[in-house]
Amino acid sequence: MTESEMRLLEQYIDGMLPEGDIVRLREFLKESSEARAMLRSLATVDFGLQDIASCNTVSDVTVSGEGIDSPNSVRPQRTRAAADSSVAGWKRVALVMTSIASVTAVGLLGLLAVEWWSGDESTRDRDSLTASEVRLAEVRYSHGATLRVQQPMNEEHDQNAISTGMRLSRGTYSLGNGFVELDFFGGAVLAVEGPAEIELISQREARLFYGRVTVEAGDAQTSFLLHTPVGEVLDIGTRYGVYVQQDGVTETHVFEGLVDIQPTEAREAARRVTAESAIKLTTSGIAEVLPVSESAFPQPTRRIANLLLNSDFELGTELQVGEAEVGRWGGDICRVVGEHYGIRPFSGDGMLLFQSTGRGSDGRASPTAASQLSQWIDVTPFRSAIAEGRVRVKLRARFNRVAGDEKTDSQFTINLESFGVAPDEARRLLKSHPQMPRSRASCSLLSDSKPESWEDIETSLTLPPGTQCLQAEVLAFENVLNDQDDVSEFDGHFADHLQFELIVEPAGSEVSMNHQ
Amino acid sequence: MTNDDETTDRDLFVRLLMRHDRAIRSYLRALLPTANDVDEVMQEVSVVAWRKFGELDEPDNFRQWVCVIARYEVLMHRRKNARDRIRLGEELELLIADEGVQELAMRERQLEFLERCLEQLPPDRKQLALRVYATEEPMKTIAEQLGRTPEALYKLMSRLRRSLLECVERSVAEAGQS
C-alpha cells in the first residue's frame, strides 16, 4: 500500500477526507481487500485509544504499618486531573532540591515561588522572594482571549498571547476580547470576560476596573476580596458575578451564598446581598435592586463532588438488595465491613465487601457473573449546560482483594451510564425492559494479588444533550471461576472511597454570545 | 416468563453486552464516520438486541449475533443521514462489515494488547496520544496549545497510530504462536 493510499484511509477515519477524494477512496477499497482490512485495523486503534483515554488506572496506595495513608496525604486537595496525583510528592522533592542547591535559573525560581506560595502561609519565607516572582493565579482556560499587562511586573508576561497553564504574577491585566478562567492559588476561581481590566493583588484579592467577572470562591476558607469602583465585595463562601461599567457603576449578582459590599464612601453602611438577588451601585452610593441574571456573566468551570452519597462506605451505610435509588445504593448482596481478612479500608472505618452475584433467585449460571451495586444521580439541575454539551462526569474507585490463588477472581469494573429520562422513569423502564443508556463509560481493572495496596481506576463521560440522570455502578466479576454458591461467591473483594465529580465546562456570558 | 426469569435474562444480557461492548464498538467504528455516530448506533443496537435476545440460542455466539444486528442498524443510520457527503456506499459498507464479522475475535485481542503497546511508547508520546483522544477539542486547537502546527501534530499522530498498530498485530501473532 502506498503512502498516499494509507493517508486516504487515515483521513477517512479522522473525518478529514476532502470531498473530492471520496471517489478515489471508494475505488481503492472496492479493489483491495488489504485496504479494507487496514481500514478496520485503523478503526480498531482509533476506537481503542479513545476507550483508553476515557479510562485511567490511577495509582496504587500502599498500606503502611502505621495504617493507611489518608487520601489527602497523597494527593493535592484540589484535584485537577488524575495525572496530578504525584504533584504533592514532586513539590516536596523540588523544595528540598532547591533549598540545598544554588538556583540560578530564573524559570526554576519562578516555579519554586509558585509552589512555595501555594503552600501553608505559616511556612512562607516572604523575604526570600520579590513580588514580581510570586505567581498569584494560573490561566486554566482561555477562549479567544488576548491579555496585556498594563503595569508589567515581569517581562515574561508583557505579551498579547495567552495560553492555558500560564501563571500570572501581580499586575494589572487588560483583556481585549474573549474569556479567561483564572485559578487563584488562594482557592477561588475567576471567570473574566473581555473587554475587562483587572489587577491581581494577591492570591485572594483582585481589583476590577471594568468588565464582567464571575467569582467562584468555594467555601469560607477560600474567600476572595474583589475591589470595585464602588467598594469591596467580600464573599462568604459563594458564587457571584460583578459587572463594572466604564463609568464605575457596579452590578453585583449573587448566585449562591452571600456577599458583603463595603462601600468606598466611609459614611455608607455595608450592604449584604443574599443568594439569587442583585444590586446596582453608583460611585455616589445610589443603590438599585435588580433581578439576578446568571446568564449575563461568564461561567467558570464548576466542580460538584457531592452528588454520589455514602460513597466512602462508612460503617452503618445502608445497602439495598434490589433496586438502587437516587442517593441510595442498591444491587446484589454486598456488605459494608470494617477491617476484613486482614485488609483495612482505604479511608474511614468501612469499605464495601462484594459477596454474591445474584439476588437470591438466580438459578442460571452466567458466563460473566458480577456482583454489582449502583446508585442513581439526578442531573436535571444542570440541564441547560448538558444541552450545550458542557457537562462531564468522572467516577473513580479504589479496589482491593485477598491474595487468593489461581482460582481467585480478579476483575473489578466501574460504569457510568446516562439516561434521557428522569430517575424514577429510568428505574421503572429498567424493570420492564432495559432502557439502554444514551451513553456509557466503563473502566476495568484486573487486580493484583497484593492486599497491602489498593488499586485505583477512573472513568469519565461527557453527558449527551437530553441526559436527565445517571447510574454509577461498581462491580466485581467472577472472571476466573464462576462459583455457584449464591451467598458468598467472592473470596474477599472490596471497593472503597468512590469519588464522583460533575464538571461543568466554562462558557461566556449571553452578552458575549450576542456580540459574536 | 416470570419476573425472576426476566431479571435473570436482563442481567445476562447486560453482562454479555458489557463484556463485548468494546469489540462491537470497534466494529462499528470502521463503518461509521465519527465516534458520536458509533454512540448513537450502539444505543439502537442495544435496544434491538435486547428485544430479540430470546432468539439467541447460545450466549457464546452473542458477539457475532450482535454484529449482525449492528450491520443492519448502520445501514438504517446511514440512510437516515443520507445527506452525508463522505459515504462509501451501501455495497462497500456491507462488504467491510461482513469481512469485519470474521475478524471479531482478532480485533478483541488487538484491543487487549493496545494498552500494553501504548505503555511501550516514550512517556511524552503516550501522553500526547491520550491527550488528543481524551478531549473533544479539534486537532487544530490542541496543536495551538502544544505550540505545533496542525499538520505537524497530525503527522505525529499518524506515526504513533501506525506504530501502535504494528505493535498490536505483532503481539497478537506472537500470542497465537505461543
Image: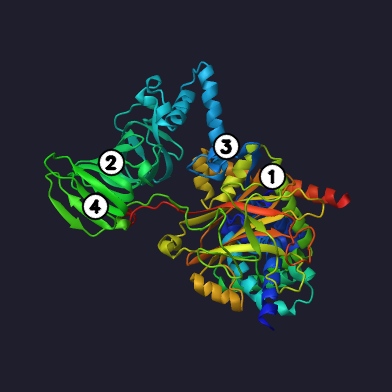
> Do the residues at pointers 2 and 4 share their chain?
yes
Q: Amino acid at mark 2?
A: Leu
Assess disc 1: are there few (<14), some (14-19) or many (≥20) residues with their C-alpha within 10 Å of its C-alpha.
many
- The residue tagged 1 is B118
Tag 1's secondary structure? helix
In the rendered view, tell whether residue A105 sits above or below residue B146: above
Q: In front of the other: label 2 or label 1? A: 2
Q: Between disc 3 and disc 2, whose residue precedes?
A: 3
> Residue A226 shows which numbered tag?
2
Q: What is the C-alpha distance between the residues marked 3 and 2?
A: 33 Å
**Which structural element holds mark 2?**
strand
Alpha carbon of mark 1 to alpha carbon of mark 4: how far? 53 Å
Residue B163 seen anywhere in this rendered image of the structure:
no
Camera-nearest label, 1 or 3: 3
Q: Do badges 4 and 3 share one subunit? A: yes
**Residue under label 4:** A273
Chain at numbered mark 3: A
Q: Who's the residue at 66% across and 57% down the image? A: A353
Which element is circle 4 on? Answer: strand
Task: Residue under label 3, please give it.
Answer: A86
